[in-house]
Amino acid sequence: MYNSYTLLYMTINADLRILSRATPAATAPLVSPTGAGILHLGLGSFHRAHQAMYTAAAIQQDGGDWGIVGVASRSRTVVDALRAQDFLYSVATISPSGTSLAIPGVHTDAFVGAEHPERVVSQIADSGIRIVTLTVTENGYSYSPATQHLDLDDPIVRADLQGGAPRSTIGQLARGIQARAAAGGSPLSILSCDNLASNGEHTEKLVREFLHALPAGEASEALAFLDRGVTFPSSMVDRIVPSTTPQLRDEVAALLGAHDGIPVPGEPFTMWAIEDRFAGGRPSWEAGGAVFTDEVGRYEQMKVRLLNGTHSLIAYLGALRGVGTIPEAIGIDRIADAARAVMRGEYEPSVEVPADVDIRAYEAELFERWGNSALGHRTAQVGSDGSVKLRQRIPEPALLALGQGRMPHLIALTVAGYLSCLAPLPGFDPGTHAASMTDPARERLAGFSASVRDGAELARRVITDLQLFGAELAHQDAFIARVGELVDTIRRRGVDAALSDAVSSAEESMLETNPMNTKEGRR
Ligand code: CS2
């Protein structure tokens, strides 16, 4: 489960003061990829600290042509820096006991997708590429949170369906698959590495919906190819990767003796569980510790709910409490109690634990990971994009509890925290950390908060009218009322009062369900 990476490869061009392959390595020789078998969409920090590291380990072990062509969606920053640095950058593994560096060296090219959308399509069609991997965030799949189907009202999706160079990820995949089918249809796998439930199935469904929405006959060859030669394995990815800071650049420069413009920080823990269904082969990612398993669905559920769901609670309540980082937030007793209670009492009952995971050890490790004070993971980062992230994290566990006659008080508190940060009612100031959270629904939420009278009305507008958490939760009146109440408590009596209220209500309802539950027993 746990890997700590050693220094894979490092070479420093002292004259240019940038990372470069030009000077032979003084220590371990780098096994460079002999070609690119992977196209990656979403060249952000997470990919560079996670998949790239596993791929580096596989190439170190086996050699081969599993290099990665990286596609950044819009920003030039990483692409320009990678080109200037001979496609090298460092991954800084940060723990309170120190920082170590690794340089994966697996990218063979990089470009900006928005600038060259036709190249994305032709790369997917290229038979040398056997895997397309994705880290485009929960927000990058162009689906409606309410229906879970491809969002045909999204103007970008509509334009992509009409032809021209596609700009949405799903449009690019579908157009690439059409081009690949036309070019002979060599086997391909598309591997989502985003925090979405059943991410492989979900991606396949959206690509198929795109193809089915094209004029009759236009996609028949591509659809036949999908049936015959394309797989969409699911995967669960895990590594906490904060944003890069100027301090990190300085620290890396000191350790490396060279300037790296795009180092990536990451925690020591890393995990990747993957379904082993690759149509055109795959790298030996197990060399980096990846687990190939039929239980990916369980790993995903466990991670998205226990880690990500609880993370959201810590981020929103922490930000409202005025703290800027996750370790500071989890250091506040009331927030730690709420995190423990939501994890054990509200998420865990909805999860089927994978056979080889010890759930108590997993949960204890989560607290250690959140407490990594050297990492500086920001509450604003975890709190951003809640409108798309929470849809993955909360509805199913909440519905399960409600169906069993239990109110999920702490999931309700998570939603109340989210609304208080992003849609503060008039007169309530959620503070600077909440103010710096970004969210695609921010404007719509701000519109609501300006026009409602209280928390109950706000919760109804967001959960029922906007169906931000799906169609089913939209009709759970008791849950919506509880969210509204907690929004009002936060506004009138403060975050601590809302935390105490939700934690003690959760304890009471647990005792009602099972009188053998005592506070000590649950710790
Ligand atoms: C976090 C995740 O930002 C968030 O919402 O919960 O990015 C989390 O750090 C990763 O999923 C950990 O693997």
Image (cartoon, rainbow, N blue to C red):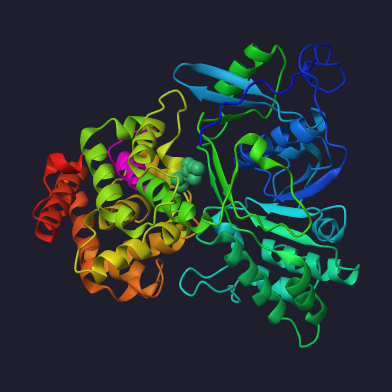
Characterize the magenta stretch by its predominant secondary structure. Answer: helix
69 in relation to 329, above or below = below
At 35% from the left and 47% from the top, the residue drawn is 310
Residue 410 picture location, percent across and down: 25, 53
Residue 247 visible in the current orientation: yes
- Image quadrant assignment for residue 146: bottom left
The magenta segment is 312-326
Residue 352 picture location, percent across and down: 39, 57
Viewer-side residue, 310 vs 191: 191
Residue 75 picture location, percent across and down: 69, 45
Residue 399 picture location, percent across and down: 31, 68
At 31% from the left and 34% from the top, the residue drawn is 330
Residue 424 visible in the current orientation: no
At 30% from the left and 76% from the top, the residue drawn is 475
- Image quadrant assignment for residue 117: bottom right
- Image quadrant assignment for residue 31: top right
Q: Is residue 220 left or right of residue 250?
A: right
Viewer-side residue, 222 vs 466: 222
**Which quadrant of the figure contains the C terminus?**
top left
Q: Is residue 505 left or right of residue 477?
A: left
At 39% from the left and 66% from the top, the residue drawn is 469
